Amino acid sequence: MSNNLEIEIKKPKLDLNYTSDKKPVHSDANPDVKPLPKVTIDGKTYEFRPGDTIMQVAERMKVHEEIPRYCYHPGMPIAGTCRMCTVEVEKAPKLMTSCSTPAADGMVVHTRSEKVLKSRTGVMDFLLTNHPLDCPVCDKAGECDLQDYNFEYGPSKSNFKEEKRVYVDATTKKLSDKITLNMNRCVHCERCVRFTDDVTKTNDLVMVNRGWHKELEATDPEKGLTNDYQGCLTDFCPVGALTMNDFRFKKRSWFLTKKASVCDRCSKGCNIEVHSDADIVYRYIPIFNEMVNGHWMCDEGRTSYNDFMNPMRVIAPLMKHEGEFHATSFETLLTDIKKHVREASSVELVVGTDATREEAALLKDKVPALFGKSMNVSYHNGFISSLAEDKKLDHMLRMTDKTPNTRGVEEQGLLALKNGEVTSDVVIFFRNGRAGIPKMKANQKVILWGVWTIDEVKNFPSQNVLAVIPGLATIEKAGSYKNADGIVQKFHPAITHRGSALSAHQVADVLKSLN
Amino acid sequence: MGTINISRKYTAKQKSYLPAIFVGLKITMKHFIKGFFFRKNVTIQYPEVKRDYSDRFRGMHFISVDKNKTENCTACFLCETVCPADCIHIVADEREDEFNPDGVKKEKKPVSFDIDALRCCFCGFCEEACPKDAIKMSGNYEMAVSSREEAFYDLDHLKRDIKGRGKIV
C-alpha cells in the first residue's frame, strides 16, 4: 500500500448532540482542569467530569458489568422512569437512580449490594407481570434486555397468578410500512417516544392513557410513523415491542454472524454491523461512532443490503454473443474486451464515485496500461455535480450525495465527467451499485464493471453493452472511503462473496497474466 | 517394560472342547423343542405382524395440528437451533389473520418446514425443545424409501393424520 492510503482523521466540527434542546449539564465544564472530583464505585475510585451522572461515570470508566437499564440511552435525554438502574449511595436514605443522579465528590456507590439486587428483582417481577411468554415467536429473543436482565436479576417465580393484560387491537399493529408494534410486550420505557421527540424531532409517537391502559400510538394514527430513522426504534427497544418488517421473522438473532463495515448508501458513511448467516445478509445495524453517525442510521441505508443480496445480481462474467448474454470465464471475457478496446479509436474509463480509494487509484494508474491503450479516466457521481451541492437533507445524517466516496475518488486526482456525458467510442464503466449512470448515445459500446443487476444491464441507456465484469460490493471487499466530513474509514470484508465475481485488483491480475 | 503374558492356562477338560459342545447343543435342543412341538416362536411374521415397541420409541417425525388443521408450530426455530445433525430447515413468515383465530398465540407460521430424515439421528432433542409440542416423533419405524427425495419430509407430510403417537399396528 502506498503512503496516501493511511488513515487520516481530521477532527470535524459536527453537531452530534442531536438532542440540542436539552444540553448536558457539563457542556461548559472543561474536562482537562485538574483536580477532578472523585467518586467511589464498588470500592474503586474514579475521577469524573463534573456534571456526569453515576451511570455516565460508570459507562465512561467501564466499571465491570454494566448497570442494567431500560429507559436510559446514551443518545437520548434522561428520563429515570424504569427504576432498573437503582444503586445504593452511602448516606442517602433511599436507593438512587444512577442514570439521573449526578455524581458528587466523595460519593460512595454500591451497584450490586444486597438491597440493590432485591430492588431489581422487584422491578423485574413487576415488568413481567404483564409481559407475555412469547419469546419463541419474538424476534428480539436472544438480544433482549428483558431476557438478559431477568436471567441475571429476575425472580425465579412470578408472584402473580392473574390473567395477563392483552391489548387486543395492538398485538400486531403496523405503525408504518417499516415498523410493527406488539403492545403486549412493551415495558413502557418510552425510549421510542423520546427518540421521536428529541432526536428526529418529528414527534410522531406518543403514549396515550395511563397506568394499566398506557399504550403507544402514532400521534397521527392515519399517517403513522413518518420519520426516516424508524429502524433505530427496533435497535434500542429493550423488548420486542417494535420490530422491523424488513427483518421480521427472517432469522433468529443467535444465528447471525456480526462483522463491522461501512454503509455505502450516502456520503455520510455510517458505521454498521453486518448481520449475516451463511454469507447471506439479513440486516445492518449501526455501530456507535461519535464522529460519524452517533448511535443512529437512516432506513434507506439500513435496507440497502437488499441491493447486494438481489437474486438478479450479475455474479458471473457475462459476454454478449449474437445478441444474447452468456456466462463465460474471466480469461475469455477479458481477452475479448481487450480486443474491443484496442480496436476502438478512443476509449473512456468512467469510475463511479462508489469505488473505494484503492480501486480508484488502481483504475486510474494501472488499468489503462494493462489494456495497452491510453484512456481518458474520469469519475461520475450522478447525484450532485459538484461537492458544494452535497448537503444534509435533515438535521441528522442523510446526505444529498448517495454515493459513499466522491471525496476519496477526487483525492486520487480524477476529474468529473464533463456534463455527465460520455463521448468516446468504447466506454468502460466501473460502478458498485450506487453511482448514477452517465448520459450516452443509444448505440455506444459499453463494458460494465462492478455490481450490476440483470435488469440494470438490460435497461441500460446504451443498448450496445458488450460485456459485464462482475465485481464485489462494499460488504464483500476491503478498502476505504472518505466521507462527507473528510474522515477516511477503512473496512474489511464482512461476508464472503459466493458467486464468481472478482475484486478489481484480482481482475487486474488476470489482465496482467494475459499480456 | 516388556510384554505381559495374559494367555490362560486351560485344564484338560477345557482342552477337549467336548463338554462345551454338549452344553451348546442342550440349549439349541431346548429352543427347538419349545418351538417345534409347543409352538412358542421367538420370530414374528413381520410385514403381516408388527413388532410392538415402547411408547417412548422415537420414529418418523410429525407436526401436531389443532382443530382447524392449522399446525401448532410457530416457527420459533428452537428445534433447528438444538438439532445436532442440522437436519431441520425452516422458513418463517407472518400468519394471515384467517388462519390465526387465537390472535397473538400464533402470529408466526412456518412457510416451509423440511426435515432431512437421512441426516436425522433420532435423538429427540427437537421434540424436547419445542415449546408448542408441535414437532413430535411417532412410533412409526417404517422409514424405508426408494429415493433420496422421499426422505425429505416437508410440511404436508409432517402434518399428516396421526392417531395417538402414530404407532403402526
Image (tube, coloured by chain):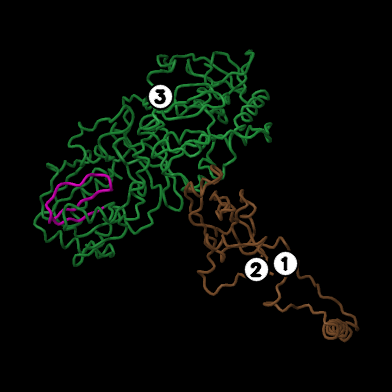
Give the letter of the chain under mark 1. Answer: B
Q: Identify the element where label 1 is drawn.
A: loop
Q: CA distance from mark 2 to mark 1?
A: 9 Å
Which residue lies at the image location 18% right of the left edge and 42% below the top edge?
A414
Percent x, y of residue A396 = 33, 29
Please report the bounds of the magenta region as a residue range: A426-449
Does the magenta run of residues contain A435? yes
Decide if residue A167 is on the left or right side of residue A441: right
Rendered view: A247 above or below A425: above
From the image, state the color of chain A.
Answer: green
Q: How many marks?
A: 3
Residue type at numbered disc 2: Tyr
Q: Nearest the camera: A7 or B87? A: B87
Q: Are marks 2 and 1 in contact (CB under 8 Å)?
A: yes
Q: Are marks 3 and 2 in contact (CB under 8 Å)?
A: no
Residue of label 3: A197
Q: Residue A86 placed where, x, y %?
A: 59, 22
Placement of B9 over or under A92, stated as above or below: below
Residue A178, magenta (yes or no): no
Residue linked to disc 1: B53
| Amino acid found under the numbered disc labelled 1 | Tyr
